[in-house]
Image: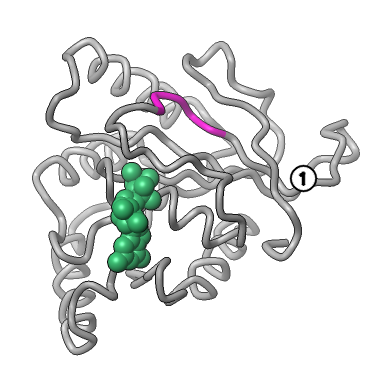
């Protein structure tokens, strides 16, 4: 599945533009600059697909990616869609943009039956920040299954990674919708990608 080419099918600025519910969806969330685009590109082995958001807050849309080669007709749906959610937490965002982010994301999380899991990306150097905690609150409230992925683990010492994993696990242990496994990745060094692909396939099947 991840070895095939993937394509971008649509950017969704508001709920009414969502594609009809079809394949199981896996969404990615994280603070701006957490390495979300890099991780999605690394997962599907395509450099320029998910746009890197070096202009903070540029992509205020839900971006849909599917493996290529499916017509999308009822009997020819892709087995999985990846949804790149807008980054959050950028300092200079105007308030109405933040409100829109919250509304779109919240509506999507609450209303999307085919959404199987959200991967919440956390920068290994920073750990779970207040704003991440607020997003986890939102996910718990919406009762959407989510799993933490640590990004950029090449930037911390190799010995620090297991500590960070157990630290992070301890921090989410009381959260009802959190999946009790943390995946450590580096897009740069191709670490943890197979583990994440496997987790996605399992989440999609379940
Ligand atoms: P996004 O805003 O969450 O989509 O983040 P990007 O994917 O655009 O990445 C933000 C910055 O972090 C870029 O300068 C990337 O090159 C860098 N970056 C992303 N992933 C990694 C990684 O695994 N290791 C390192 N060292 N840098 C990374």
Q: Quadrant of the N terminus?
A: bottom right
Q: Is residue 189 left or right of residue 113?
A: left
**Residue 102 is inside the magenta segment:** no
Q: Residue 91 placed where, x, y %?
A: 12, 31
* Residue hosting label 1: 78
Q: Nearer the viewer, residue 179 or 34?
A: 34
Q: Image quadrant of residue 186?
A: bottom left
Q: Image quadrant of residue 90?
A: top left
> Secondary structure of the magenta portion, mostly?
loop
Q: Is residue 75 left or right of residue 22?
A: right
Q: Is residue 121 left or right of residue 80?
A: left
Residue drawn at x 81%, y 40% is 77
Q: Report whether the residue tagged 1 is closer than 8 Å to ligand 1.
A: no
**Which residue of the protein is positioned furthest toward the bottom in this rendering?**
159
Residue drawn at x 85%, y 46% is 69
Residue 13 vertical placement versus 55 (above, below): above
Q: Quadrant of ligand 1?
A: bottom left
**Residue 60 is inside the magenta segment:** yes
Residue 43 vertical placement versus 94 (above, below): below
For residue 177, say whether it is visible: no
Task: Tell me where the magenta segment starts and ends, as one range.
Answer: 59-63
């Amino acid at each position: 599945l991840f070895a095939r080419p993937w394509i971008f099918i649509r950017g969704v600025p508001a709920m009414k533009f969502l594609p009809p519910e079809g394949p199981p969806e896996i969404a990615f969330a994280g603070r701006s600059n957490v390495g979300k685009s890099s991780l999605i590109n690394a997962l599907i082995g395509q450099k320029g697909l998910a746009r890197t958001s070096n202009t903070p807050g540029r992509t205020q849309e839900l971006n849909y990616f599917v493996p290529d080669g499916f017509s999308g007709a009822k009997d020819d749906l892709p087995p999985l869609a990846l949804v790149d959610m807008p980054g959050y937490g950028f300092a200079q965002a105007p308030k109405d943009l933040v409100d829109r982010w919250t509304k779109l994301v919240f509506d999507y999380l609450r209303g999307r039956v085919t959404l199987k899991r959200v991967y919440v990306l956390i920068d290994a150097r920073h750990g779970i920040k207040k704003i991440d905690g607020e997003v986890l609150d939102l996910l718990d409230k919406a009762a959407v299954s989510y799993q933490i992925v640590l990004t950029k683990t090449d930037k911390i010492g190799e010995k620090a990674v297991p500590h960070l994993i157990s630290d992070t696990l301890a921090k989410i242990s009381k959260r009802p919708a959190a999946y009790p496994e943390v995946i450590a990745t580096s897009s740069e060094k191709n670490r943890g990608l197979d583990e994440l692909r496997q987790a996605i396939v399992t989440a999609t099947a379940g």
